[in-house]
Image (cartoon, coloured by chain):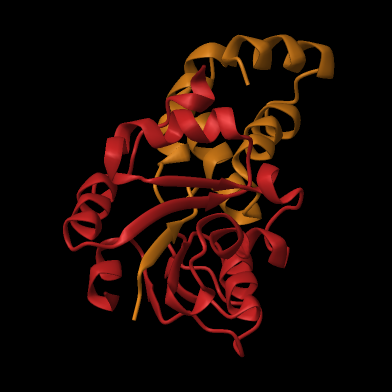
Amino acid sequence: MVRLVTFDVYMVLVDIKGSLVPKVTEILGLNKLKADKLSICGEQNRWNARRLVIHWVAVEHNSPLHRISTQLHSLAF
Amino acid sequence: MSWDTLTLWPEAYQVVAEIRERGYKTAILVNGDSDTLNSLAKPFGDNMQYISSSEMASAYKPHPEVYNLPEQKLRIVKTVVLHVAGSGNYVIGAGSFGIDCYWSNRNFDKLLDPSLPPKNEVPDLKGVLELL
């Protein structure tokens, strides 16, 4: 008989992709096609969300690392 | 901060609220720091009663010490815990520790170790209530 229900948060309770993609798109100036492509790439790799966002920017957006750092700071991670 | 203001899945609030209405205890059991998790738990108000984080266990899921937190901190034995997992790794972690698990498998992932299956696997949270 169950007494306690425990929850993962990321993926279970909160919509990470739906929450962060618009912000990343806006801040980095990505167009919708690019944002969708990066989102699909992230899902296929099944990485955790913080790494996922960095992956979007670093690999797919092909940004230099120093620029990424500045941009992520804007997101206040 | 962006990370602290993530949007809930549409059914999340109602499912957690109904679990509480039925008299079950609720807790977050997740990798993360307490400050971030407190922020993420806020939208649930009193319906999310406890937060158990990897910070408390000094280990990260799927390490068994994290799944042991309910017993360690709340004195609730693992045989009466149902864990709602969001990824296959955490399903396996809960199963190997001996906790029943529900998998909210929104990406339709495959379980790497089929010998530790969840009790139910649904692409959202609505099936949790059927297990209670």
As displayed, is residue A39 above or below residue A25? below
Which sits in the foreground, A56 or B86? B86
- Picture quarter with the N terminus of chain A: bottom left
Q: Position of residue A25 (x, y in %)?
A: 50, 21
As displayed, is residue A12 above or below residue B96? above
> Can I make out residue A7 in this image?
yes
Chain given the colour red:
B
Answer with left or right where residue A58 lies relative to residue A2: right
Q: Which residue is drawn at 49% across and 54% down?
A: A8
Instruction: Locate residue B47: give its quadrant.
Output: top left
Q: Residue at x 73, y 63 (%)?
A: B63
Answer with left or right where residue A4 lies relative to residue B71: left
Most extreme residue toward the bottom is B115
Q: Residue at x 28, y 39 (%)?
A: B46
Q: Where is residue B16 in the image (x, y as percent from the top left)?
A: 27, 52
Instruction: Locate residue A72: give its quadrant.
Output: top right
As displayed, is residue B65 above or below residue B32? below
Q: Position of residue B102 (x, y in %)?
A: 42, 71
Q: Residue at x 58, y 72 (%)?
A: B94
How many labels were placed on the picture? 0
> Can I make out residue B106 in this image?
no
- Picture quarter with the C terminus of chain A: top right
Which sits in the foreground, B78 or B122? B78
Specify the colour of chain A.
Answer: orange
